[in-house]
Amino acid sequence: MVLFAKRSELLGTENAFKVGEDIRRVEASGRDVIRLNLGEPDFNSADNINLKAKQEIDRGNSHYTDPAGIPALREAIAEQVGRTRGFSVIPEQVAVFPGAKPSIAYTLLTYVNPDDEVIYPSPGFPIYESWVIYVGARPVPLHLEESRGFAFTAEDLDKLLTPRTRVLIINSPSNPTGGVLSQRDLEEIAEVVRARTDENFRIYSDEIYEQILFDGNVHRSITSLPGMRERTILVSGHSKTYAMTGWRLGYAVLPTVEEANAFKQLNINIVSCVPPFIQEAGVEALRNPANPAIIAEMSRQFQLRRDMVVDALNAIDGITCARPGGAFYVFPNIAGVCDKLGILRAYEGLPAQQKKRSSPSTLFQLFALYRHGVATLDRRSFGVVGSEGRHFLRLSIAADPDTLKEGINRLKNASRDSEGFADFFSRMPER
Ligand code: PMP
């Protein structure tokens, strides 16, 4: 008898959380760490939202709710999504979860059989690939190329679609690249989807960064295009827009009430419901007219930091960094640094088993953390399948400007420290 079920080996992870163990180890050794790993606003939720939750708790609003979400919240979501995407949504199409994340699992569990294929962006949010593999489906990464601003073309998509493809996952603005799909990109994707798939094909559109956009960009959703809302699971939530990551509040708008009920059924089986005072605070977030200005100011701050960080990274020999159009990440190419520090060579010399679990950018990420005190994430943290030969890091810019400056300074020092890397590598325990 073995302890763990077979499938438990298949589950991936989100290194943004997992790297916490390494950070604690580094801190325990007496070195401070600049944390650019986790994707959450460094701003707090607005006073009006906080106050509402406190009032609701005091009022005794602390019991189970409708597993699909309280009617007031589903109405507010239906109204907001309908208004911004230009079609009518009814509250019965909406399902509310503890964060946007559960909807990834729910989508894979609801629509995808073993051996079906799922196309997802790579680099992309790692939980997509994790769940695709967990349900026994075939992972089909859609590579976002740096040279195209981390967008993909309809042609790329067309090549990957087969009769077995059940779901296409898209995410704009994107984690980890900050890339934004243009109206034209979306139109082309929609055209391919209309031409190549049937009515049971689903798009999972992760729009969680919808309001964190730069340079005057406006959010565009594939659901606004003809024939698309009938096949799209539109997902968003409060974590990023309202700086409510730890509150755990997210939602999906499903193409049909029947599908929303399937998601509700999963809530009943797994979480029952989101705490009622959090859902009430979620209504406040959506309805309080003071909040759009707060969001706009947060995005403005992120844009200023983006400019500072992108310029500083591009000034480092061996690093090139694209300027993201939204979200709060930058995704520099560190191929030059991997070459300069001898990391490419060191990686090639690793035993096959170790090589499979690592990559040059993983080695640099570990070196930068353990020897230079700056926590970032490697390329493999955003989809392993097909990630070989791609050398990137993700930095979160959701940190105050002084912290960001110090973090980049440490990266710069790491990028010049060949001797330090050689020493680190020679002492590195097996990973
Ligand atoms: N999708 C993407 C693209 C994300 O970046 C995140 C959070 N990092 C999520 C979903 C999950 O959001 P939540 O915290 O609301 O579950």
Image (spheres, grey):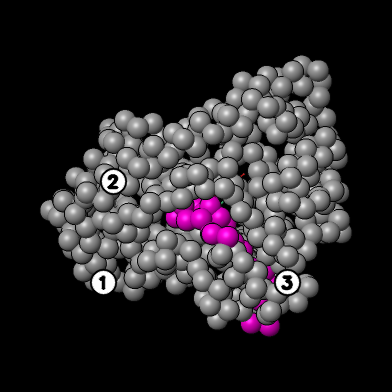
Question: How crowded is the residue under tag 2: few (<14 C-alpha within 10 Å), some, or many (20+)?
Answer: some
How many numbered discs, if any? 3
**Residue 97 in magenta?**
no
Mark 1 secondary-structure assignment = helix
| Highlighted magenta segment, given as a residue range | 162-183
Q: In this figure, which residue is indicated by the disc labeled 3?
A: 201
Dominant SS type (magenta): loop
**Residue 166 in magenta?**
yes
- Rendered image quadrant of residue 347: bottom left
Which quadrant would the C terminus be assigned to in this image?
bottom left
Percent x, y of residue 220: 61, 54
Q: What residue is drawn where x is 78% and y is 38%?
A: 76
Percent x, y of residue 233: 72, 58
Kind of residue indicated by mark 2 = Asp
Q: Earlier in the sequence, mark 2 or mark 3?
A: 3
Kind of residue indicated by mark 1 = Glu
Q: On the rendered structure, is 194 left or right of 387?
A: right
Q: What residue is drawn where x is 26% and y is 55%?
A: 319
Q: Which disc is residue 311 wearing?
A: 2
* Distance Cα–Cα, label 1 vs label 3: 41 Å
Percent x, y of residue 38: 46, 42
Q: Earlier in the sequence, mark 2 or mark 1?
A: 2
Q: Earlier in the sequence, mark 1 or mark 3?
A: 3
Q: On the rendered structure, is 129 left or right of 204?
A: left
Q: What residue is drawn where x is 69% and y is 79%?
A: 195
Q: Nearer the viewer, mark 2 or mark 3?
A: 2
* Residue 235 can be seen in this image: yes
Q: On the rendered structure, is 310 left or right of 415?
A: right
